[in-house]
Image (tube, helix red, strand yellow):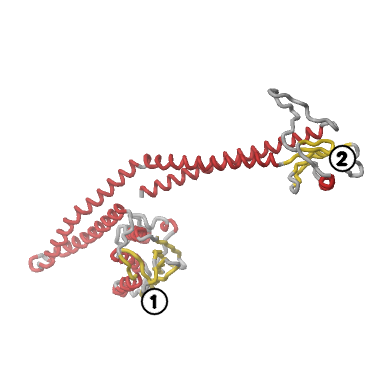
Amino acid sequence: MIRELRKKFIAINMLLIFLVLLIVFSTVCVSAYKRETDESRMTLQMLADRQDGQGPRPFYVGQRLPDDFVRAPAFVFRTDPDGNPHLIFLENISVTEAGLRRIAQEITAAPENEGVLKLYNLRFFKRSERGGLKVALIDLSEERAAVRNTVLISALSLLASLSAFFVVSFFLSGWVFKPAERAWQQQRRFVADASHELKTPLTVILANAGILKNSCAEVPQGLWKWIDNTEAEAKKMKRLVDDLLFLAKSDGTGQPAVHAKINFSDLVQSTTLSFESLAFNRKIRIDASCVEANICVNGDDFKLHRLVSILIDNAVKYAEDAGTVSVALVLRRSRAALSVHNNGIPISEADLAHLFERFYRADRARSGEGYGLGLAIAGSIAEQHGGKILAESDAIRGTLFTVLLPAGRGT
């Protein structure tokens, strides 16, 4: 349980940290893109504002770059009223006449005053001037490289930050849950020790009750009901102690108890037969015709028998009189699917979420025997064998418990 809590703690921490870092680095990347785009647009407008034939101002080593310095390859051309382009400025780039005409035609046809020529990897800015157009263009390679580097650095920083936070969260979770783990171990030991200590006096009580029942002549007639009541309550208490001890041992190992290959089909069939007499008393029919043969699982025979017994016992106990309990076993993609169904009183949605919790009893079971440990034990056994239990219930389809276990075909 503590291990699962630690996993959830780390997962929630990492999710929150990932979302925060993702927002931060996304903001950085978007800001970098906007900054580079704005800088390119400002450069284009500056180039468009230059007089024809005006080049960049000279600068000397050690001095600050002039404001109109152009870092990226760029050029400016003007079109006459007939649409013919004429170059008026070039910076670190060369353009052929044919290429210039194609670019001019594309930009002239463009409805917006600024945009991107994807085919040429150029950003342009145009405005009407002297009966034609004055167009400034700048190469996008530097802009895109800057944005790409920012994204790459952000991604690497995100991965490095997540790795660092994972290590911190892992050790922090151990420190946070250490007191809880200690308390859980103490509670588990107490339950196991108490269960062991209670078994001896309960065995003595049951033995004494049996001796009294066998001494018919010596027991006054009026005491029989007290003896029967004592024996019945002692048996109930013994079942509770056995269940608590089983769960305490399960919590202690935390590992699946895998011992041998078991023919699960035969186990389900034999377990179902043992409930025929109980079902007959209430005129309930147990249908096990859908149990496929030779489905095998690796596990503990005793525990798997108990798992099946718990589910069938519950189904018979809460089935409607003269109803049917259906037991089915099929192989689904290397998993044995055991289903137990009845049409008794449905389990509410609120109860379904807590069915496999210890000492939890749904409304419909409050008037019956038991302490709410049966399904908790069934869930524990399924987990020990690498499987899980699902529960569904409504007034129309009835109640269905499904157990999924790793399995295969026997020979």
Q: Which mark is residue 289?
A: 1
Under tag 2, what secondary structure?
A: strand
* Image quadrant occupied by the C terminus: bottom left
State the residue in front, 349 or 255. Answer: 255
State the residue in front, 311 or 22. Answer: 22
Q: Earlier in the sequence, mark 2 or mark 1?
A: 2
Label 2 environment density (alpha carbons within 10 Å; few <14, some 14–19, many ≥20): some
State the residue in front, 260 or 394. Answer: 260
Identify the residue position indicated by label 2 in the image.
86
Under tag 1, what secondary structure?
A: strand
- Residue 114 appears left or right of 201: right
- Residue 21 appears left or right of 260: right
State the residue in front, 2 or 190. Answer: 2
> Label 1 amino acid?
Ser
Image vertical order of residue 166 relative to residue 346, above or below: above
Q: Quadrant of the rendered structure where residue 307 is?
A: bottom left
Task: Locate residue 306, reporting x and y percent.
Answer: 30, 64
Q: Residue at x 40, y 67 (%)?
A: 336
Task: Locate residue 212, reporting x and y percent.
Answer: 12, 64
Q: Residue at x 62, y 40 (%)?
A: 149
Task: Locate residue 11, reporting x and y percent.
Answer: 45, 46
The alpha-carbon separation of the residues under discs 2 and 1 comes to 90 Å
- Residue at the far bottom: name it: 289
**Can residue 160 be seen in the rendering of this structure?**
yes
Task: Locate residue 161, reporting x and y percent.
Answer: 50, 40
Q: Nearer the viewer, mark 2 or mark 1?
A: 2
Q: Residue at x 42, y 66 (%)?
A: 335
